[in-house]
Amino acid sequence: MSREGLPPQAIRKLAPGKLVIASHNEGKVREIRDLLAPYGIEPISAKALDLPEPEETGTTFVANAELKARAAADLSGLPALADDSGLCVEALNGDPGVYTANWAERADGTRDWQMAMQKVEDALATKGPEASRSAHFVCALALAWPDGHIEWFEGRSDGTLTWPPRGEAGFGYDPVFVPLGHNRSYAELDPAEKHAISHRADAFAKLVAAVF
């Protein structure tokens, strides 16, 4: 998706102040907080406000991000920023994709990312030793205001999958994703290095250029 062709006045600016991060994922909230730090924004997580997590019924990253951002803005009365991101594996026809988090779901409702990474590796194994290990991460950011206005931005990072998982930093599928041009996984990079090259950083660069 692209905003090419839209007049500059179509983008609403975000003033310094409180902003709800519409996520209960501590790793994601931490990354977003770090990325927002230079802009006078006071991030508050949805978890800290005890906001419920809406069911993600969208079939695209943008649709799920919008759903979460609108829900948080409506319930909090504050602008809200939501991220929907996922890993898309070429040999698996783009899976897990928008169902990235679902692959980590356990029967008790908790998430096990080691299990999710194993599922991806097992699925690749069924494709044979010659299967492509190319993959990319997508991040869709939706910024919603209580009056219903919304902006969205999308970023991407290409790379390859490695096995076994490597590194202790990051979260989610980071230990098995090696970005192009690097020989270390996302989870082996320090936060500053990852912020400079990640799919989330790509989406944030577009958000910053538009709304700050």
Image (spheres, rainbow, N blue to C red):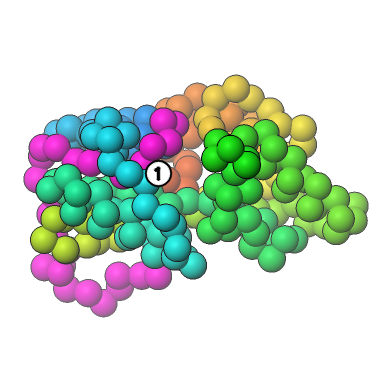
Q: Main secondary structure of the magenta part?
A: loop
**Residue 174 x, y percent position in the rendering:** 59, 36
**Residue 47 x, y percent position in the rendering:** 32, 34
Q: Residue furthest front?
A: 108
Q: Residue furthest bottom?
A: 5
Instruction: Tell me if residue 1 comes above or below residue 177 in the rendering.
Output: below
Look at the image and say whether residue 21 sits in the magenta stretch: yes
| Front residue of this view, candidates 69 and 203 | 69
One can see residue 9 in this view: yes
For the point 13% across and 55% down, the residue is: 146
Q: What residue is pinned by disc 1?
A: 201
Task: State left or right for residue 171 relative to residue 35.
Answer: right
The amino acid at mark 1 is Ala
| Front residue of this view, candidates 171 and 99 | 99
Task: State left or right for residue 11 relative to residue 117.
Answer: left
For the point 47% across and 51% down, the residue is: 85
10 Å crowding of disc 1: few (<14), some (14-19), many (20+): many
Boundaries of the magenta span: 1-27
Disc 1 secondary structure class: helix
